[in-house]
Amino acid sequence: MNPQRRLLLALAGTLAIGSTQAATLAERWTALRKEQPTLQARDAARALGTSEAELLATNLGSTVTRLRDTDHAPREIMRRALDLGRVMALTRNEHAVIETTGIASRIAQAKQGDGGAQDAERAARELNIAGGYLGGPIDLRFQFPRWKYAFAVVQPGRDGATSRSLQFFDASGGAIHKVYLKDDAAIPVFDKLVAEFRHPRQDERMAIAPAAAKPAPKPDSAVDVKEFQLAWQEMGDVHQFNRIVSEFGMTREQALRLAPAGAVRRVAPQAVRQLLEQAARQQVAIMAFVGNGAVTQIYSGKIGKVAAGGGWFNVLDPDFNLHLRDSALRSGYVLQRAGVTSVEFFDEGGDLVVSFFGVRERGKPQPQGWTELAAALPGA
């Protein structure tokens, strides 16, 4: 059993024995934080047999305000968050956390048409567009149908100053994305946003759904490998990859295993440390992608300080942090797609944890420093 999992189960058992039958979730969480003050909300929720959203909701009426979650409200809240100026955006999955500070870019408003088929198609696309966040410091790709619950949180921060954030969760209560205010001049904007999107019911009742089970992977024998490899070789753009994988009904890692000869090389999971250390040392600009199925956050640029600590391997720069629980990585790959080199790392369950590209200008080849860095990663 994973040592961290064993610790969380032991803590939960200790708390259950030492508490009364009438102990509330808030009381049990308080006790757990006393035992493990640095325990993250995600791990605390698992130890207490609940969800992150339900943990946060125990503070409704004090530090937390529930926001509306119907009629595409989370998307509209993110649109309004473009008015908050400088923010820190945080996205995580089970084993990676990415945090970027900056001012989100905006995109031009599309012109309204006559209500025909093209307008319907445009409206469907815009369900995953929040009026900005494409490129720039806060670079996000949304899947808003997977967003459900939203909260505003105002509480003392670690530095003693008041922290203001917008926090979003999926239907099972798992954290999707968080936006932290970094510009005090925008506090009135934040307060107005919270007031306008305030949920009419400020209580803990939420229809938390069980997490969906992962579908069984398609057997390799059921894949038309020859056609898949041909489609890989004919890719004209790396962005076509996800569509191809979906069309063949494959998992992402399965696609890497069945790739054309020479297109994929396995690397040691521990190679992620070498990748980040060498990118920092050689000042090779990278792109780091962390997603969770509901949103993907992307960082583009050079990195400076890297360090291990607390069971994580970290990039700790002023405006960019990346935290990887690299002990949970079970496989890594260097990919060649449409002339582009990337590196991907997966966990034991076959889920993509983090991926990396070299920063390049559109229409130009990748920097040699990046391709050499990827080529030097140790094989599995």
Image (tube, helix red, strand yellow):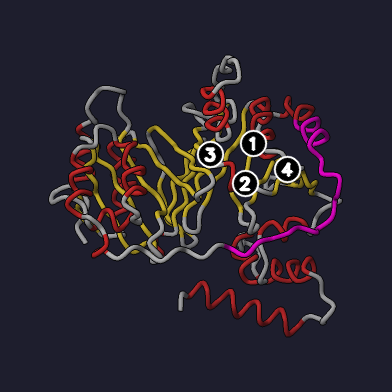
Residue range highlighted in magenta: 190-211
Q: CA distance from mark 4 to mark 1?
A: 10 Å
The reply to whether callout 4 and callout 2 are in contact (CB within 8 Å) is: no
Q: Which residue is mark 4?
A: 70
Q: Residue at 34% x, 40% y: name it.
A: 280
Q: Earlier in the sequence, mark 4 or mark 2?
A: 4
The three-letter amino acid code for the residue at tag 2 is Trp
Residue 327 in sight in this render: no
Q: Which residue is mark 2?
A: 147
Residue 220, relative to residue 320: is it above or below? below
Instruction: Give residue 359's position: percent from left, percent from top.
Output: 32, 31
The reply to whether callout 1 and callout 3 are in contact (CB within 8 Å) is: yes
Residue farthest along the bottom direction in this orientation: 17
Residue 120 vs residue 186: left or right?
Answer: left
Task: Give SS at disc 4.
Answer: loop
Instruction: Give residue 241's position: percent from left, percent from top.
Output: 31, 42
The three-letter amino acid code for the residue at tag 1 is Arg
Q: Earlier in the sequence, mark 4 or mark 1?
A: 4
Q: Which residue is mark 1?
A: 75
**Closer to the camera, 212 or 301?**
212
* Numbered tag placed on residue 142 in the rendering: 3
Q: CA distance from mark 1 to mark 2?
A: 8 Å
Q: Earlier in the sequence, mark 3 or mark 2?
A: 3
Q: Earlier in the sequence, mark 1 or mark 3?
A: 1
For the C terminus, give its image quadrant.
bottom left
Q: Residues within 10 Å of mark 3 (few under 14, many from 20)?
A: some
